[in-house]
Image: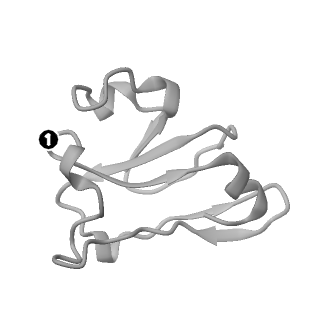
């Protein structure tokens, strides 16, 4: 999984998630700085099995909502414009994060 800040992605459709990432790995902690973020994973990760939780400043733990396609639950909605080899699983919105809603 890779976390990308919105300003890190210069040219959607022609970018390298690893080069633009602020964090990457299979698990671990990341100190979220309250900006818009893209959550990218390798395309070998199934949408229906992907899980991610975040804890905000108040201690509220929220699961990230991932929307999978109806035709194939292993693929996230909107995958058509993702970089080759990657899926954009979700976006993190700073307002929703503060409210405990992802």
Q: To which residue does mark 1 refer?
A: 84
What secondary structure is found at the residue carrying circle 1?
Answer: loop
Extreme residue in the top direction = 10
Task: Tell me what residue is drawn at x 53 percent, y 66 percent.
Answer: 64
Q: How many marks?
A: 1
Give the x, y percent position of residue 27. 44, 57
Residue 59 placement (x, y as % from top left) = 80, 65
Snapshot quadrant of residue 2: top left
Q: Residues within 10 Å of mark 1 (few under 14, many from 20)?
A: some
Give the residue at x 56% y 51%: 92
Residue 16 position in % (x across, y down):
26, 29
Of the pair 53 and 48, the residue shown nearer to us: 48
**Which colour style is shown?**
one colour
Q: Nearer the viewer, residue 96 or 63?
A: 96
Residue that appears at 38% across and 26% down: 20
Residue 86 shown left or right of residue 37 in the figure? left
Quarter holding the C terminus?
Answer: bottom right
Quadrant for residue 75, please give it: bottom left
In the rendered structure, the answer to whether residue 35 lies left or right of residue 76 reads right
For the point 25% across and 72% down, the residue is 69
How far across and how far down the image is residue 57, in percent? 82, 55
Height in image: 72 above or below 76? below
């Amino acid at each position: 999984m890779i976390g990308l800040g919105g300003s890190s992605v210069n040219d959607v459709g022609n970018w390298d998630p690893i080069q633009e990432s602020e964090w990457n790995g299979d698990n671990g902690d990341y100190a979220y700085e309250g900006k818009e973020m893209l959550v990218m994973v390798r395309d070998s990760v199934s949408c229906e099995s992907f899980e991610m939780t975040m804890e905000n400043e108040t201690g509220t733990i929220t699961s990230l909502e991932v929307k999978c396609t109806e035709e194939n639950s292993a693929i996230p909605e909107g995958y058509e414009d993702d970089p080759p080899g990657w899926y954009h699983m979700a976006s993190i919105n700073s307002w929703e994060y503060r409210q405990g809603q992802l």
